[in-house]
Amino acid sequence: MQRRFRLPAQWVTGDAVYGSDHHLRQFIQAQGLHYVLTVSKDQSFWIGKQAHRVDALIAQQSEATWQTLSAGSGSKGHRLYQWVYCHFEHPEHSQLERGVLARRSLQDPTDITYYLVSAPIGTPIEQVVHIAGMRWTIETCFQTAKAEVGLDHYEVRSWHGWYRHITLCLLAHAFLTVMTTLEIEVKKGEPNTGSLFEFKRKLGLYYL
């Protein structure tokens, strides 16, 4: 079973729209954060004064370096892929490393996704993969919110109107998530007796 990590809130992940933005990557790093960001295969990665395409760097890796790891649990079990991680010294920060992570489909070896990584030195590939896999959780939450509480059903012309709609939808989604969890606890017949349970009980939420 893959090792699980308890991570502090200091990682940023996102798709290629964000990963391809050089200024965003610099901003994330300037905030003291680390990132695992998806990029296109023709994204440049600088090693010293030489630029390399990320797909070219990954193509240089031997077959033995690829590892089968889980990107997290899905509706059908663990999402298993093959992964390889190439990392290098950071040119500006001695405590950081930069790298290129690649994810390859088990069914189609030509289906490869690439990531740029900025992480503390010595970060294991399992942890980098764990961060990359968290994107699925975020996307699932957005899809559920769109279907259940109308997250994308807005027709507004101002930022304030959009912000209010999104905030209320996410609040409703959070409430429904809590209520679903409570219902599962009731069906199991083994309610949690911790402080969160007591807080819910006092509000009368547990018995709804």
Image (cartoon, rainbow, N blue to C red):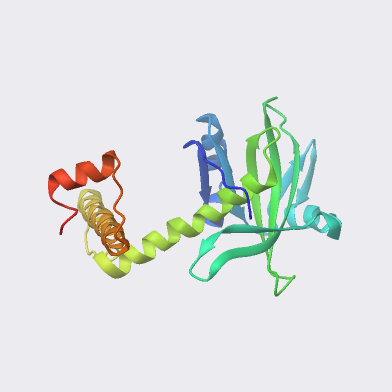
Q: Quadrant of the C terminus?
A: bottom left
- Residue drawn 20% across and 47% down? 200
Q: Is residue 176 above or below residue 193?
A: below
Closest to the observer, 92 or 191? 191
The percent position of residue 53, horizontal first and vertical second, equals 75, 53
The spot of residue 180 in percent (x, y) is 28, 61
Q: Which residue is at 16% across, 57% downward?
A: 207
Q: How many marks?
A: 0
* Side (left or right) of 171 relative to 203: right
Taking the image as shown, residue 64 lies to the left or right of residue 173, namely right
Say whether residue 20 is visible.
no
Q: Residue at x 23, y 55 (%)?
A: 175
Q: Is residue 62 left or right of residue 152?
A: right
Comparing 183 with 46, the one in front is 183
Q: Among all residues in the image, which is located at the extreme top?
A: 94
Residue 33 lies, in percent from the top left, at 53, 34
**Residue 178 appears in the rendering:** yes
Residue at the bottom extreme of this rendering: 107
Residue furthest to the front: 189
Q: Is residue 8 above or below residue 148?
A: above
Identify the residue shown where x is 26% and y is 62%. Answer: 183
Q: Quadrant of the N terminus?
A: bottom right
The answer to whether 126 is drawn above or below residue 112 in the figure is above
